[in-house]
Amino acid sequence: MEILVCVKQVPDDSQKVVLNGSGQPAIDKITPVANAFDTYALEMAARFKEANGGTITVVSVGSEDNKTSLKNCLAVGADKAYVVTDAAFDGSDALSTAYILSKTVEKIEAVDNVKFDIIFCGKESTDYTTALVGPELAQKLGAGVVTCVTELKLNADKLEAKQETEDGYNIIETSMPAVVTITKPNYDPRYPTMKSKMAARKKEIPAFTAADLGTDASMVGAANSVVKTISLSEPPKKQAGIKINEKTFEETFAKAMAVMTEAKIF
């Protein structure tokens, strides 16, 4: 079983992000980490590999700094890693990123002489949250796709996925190759051991450029992205609440009702 996991490096979402003087997110001093949903995808891939055998390859599109996150992936279940980095890719939107990843899939399959059975992606990234890269990648590869997966198992020669929806869950079966996007399962990603960390540090992470992938220059980069960012703004600051603490329960309740009536809450 050949498995690919796509990992995006993003600013640590536990840190508050503000806009700088140019109206752009001030993220220079925020530690980059692997996207949370991608870590869930890797953990599910690792468990799938443990149950069915196979090899896990991880790939990340971005700068050479992305190797930090990839090293962590190698320490918690991945076998091989590649980074895709080129200034020509800067500013690519979800559609362009899916195109880059599709060319990366072709490149890795050719280099390693494999065919990927399953491609895992996080449901969305915590920086732009479009949730589009996985489905668009599947479309470009001509593969099946199941989104918002919380469980995945092999059923004969097909995949059986439990998909989370607003109304509950669907059980969906798809043939391989397939792309699955992973939401939060009922477990957390594993922690690396000291031994696995040391082993990961010794592994080489090859890099691919636009020339290596043979990408069409008109399909990548900010200038060729179909989605344009018009402006960015910080979310409004939450207003302080009102504390109601009258002498009796009845008085407190009456005061609360009066406040909500005045605010036209109902």
Image: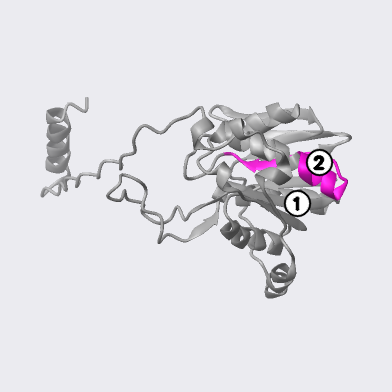
Instruction: Work out whether mark 2 precedes mark 1 in sequence or the reverse, and give the earlier one.
Output: 1
The boundaries of the magenta stretch are: 106-123
Picture residue at 60% right of the left edge, 62% below the top: 68
Picture residue at 30% right of the left edge, 51% below the top: 20
Residue corresponding to mark 2: 116
Percent coordinates x, y for residue 236 in the rendering:
26, 41
Reply above or below: 121 against 188. above
- Label 1 sits on a secondary structure element that is strand
Reply above or below: 186 against 179. below
Residue corresponding to mark 1: 57
- Label 2 sits on a secondary structure element that is loop
Picture residue at 49% right of the left edge, 45% below the top: 126
Q: Is residue 85 left or right of residue 126?
A: right
> Residue 114 colored magenta?
yes
Occupied quadrant, residue 94: top right
Report if the CB atoms under discs 2 and 1 are less than 8 Å apart: yes
Query: Pointer 1: residues within 10 angstroms few (<14), some, or many (20+)?
Result: many
Occupied quadrant, residue 119: top right
Q: Is residue 53 left or right of residue 90?
A: right
